[in-house]
Amino acid sequence: MDNVPVEKVDIMLFAGKWYSLYSIPTFTDKHWRQTIETYVIHPDGYYAVFTNYKIVGESKQKYIRSKLFVVRGSRNSRFKAQRIWPLKTDYWVIEIAEDYSYMVVGHPKYKHLSILSRKPDVDAELLREIVARCKKKGYDTTQLVSQEHKQSLPVSALVAV
């Protein structure tokens, strides 16, 4: 299984609220939990991303605004994410449900992985299947971290040994 973006993403269906369920975090979000991202189409042609999260061990909700730019010619499946100007990082949609109920965001060099859903949880069996596919694509799924929404499963229950 190759680590490649999906063929096409519908810009309108992609917009809206996404719960980050599990991730291989980056250095900027490794202490974030209960992360919720909302993608809003900006008139200037990018997504304004509004992210709410909590820091591990803290109860106060935090917030950051960032941008997501479509890579031309990618049929909206490859983006450049920008949390801190002028730095941009690859953001590939490597799996998306037909009904846009969940998606998986990856990176060409396997640096980051996020499993996102429209709801704060998904069926446990579906989650195991998603994780298994990510492992086949080359991601180190043992590095997944739960975002601790609702009754999240421990990572060890998702990763086949």
Image (cartoon, grey):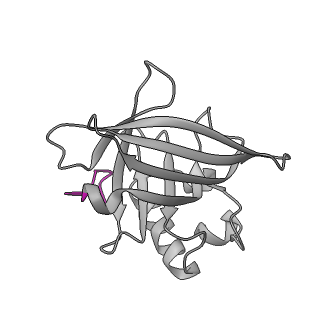
Q: Residue at x 28, y 51 (%)?
A: 5
Q: Is residue 123 above or below residue 10?
A: below
Q: Position of residue 28 (x, y in %)?
A: 62, 32
Residue in the foreground of this view, choosing between 60 and 80: 60
Q: Is residue 90 above or below residue 58?
A: above
Q: Position of residue 100 (x, y in %)?
A: 36, 69
Q: Position of residue 151 (x, y in %)?
A: 72, 74
* Horizontal relation, residue 8 to residue 140: left or right: left
* Horizontal relation, residue 24 to residue 8: left or right: right
Considering the whole magenta stretch, tell me its main secondary structure: loop
**Residue 17 in view here:** yes
Q: Position of residue 59 (x, y in %)?
A: 83, 50
Q: Which residues are magenta?
A: 1-10
Q: Residue at x 43, y 50 (%)?
A: 39
Query: Magenta stretch containing residue 58, yes or no?
Result: no
Residue furthest front in the image? 43
From the image, which quarter does the N terminus lie in?
Answer: bottom left
Q: Residue at x 59, y 73 (%)?
A: 121
Q: Residue at x 29, y 39 (%)?
A: 43
Q: Find residue 157 and report its image quarter.
A: bottom right
* Horizontal relation, residue 120 to residue 56: left or right: left
**Total number of numbered discs in the rendering:** 0
* Horizontal relation, residue 60 to residue 131: left or right: right
**Residue 139 in view here:** no
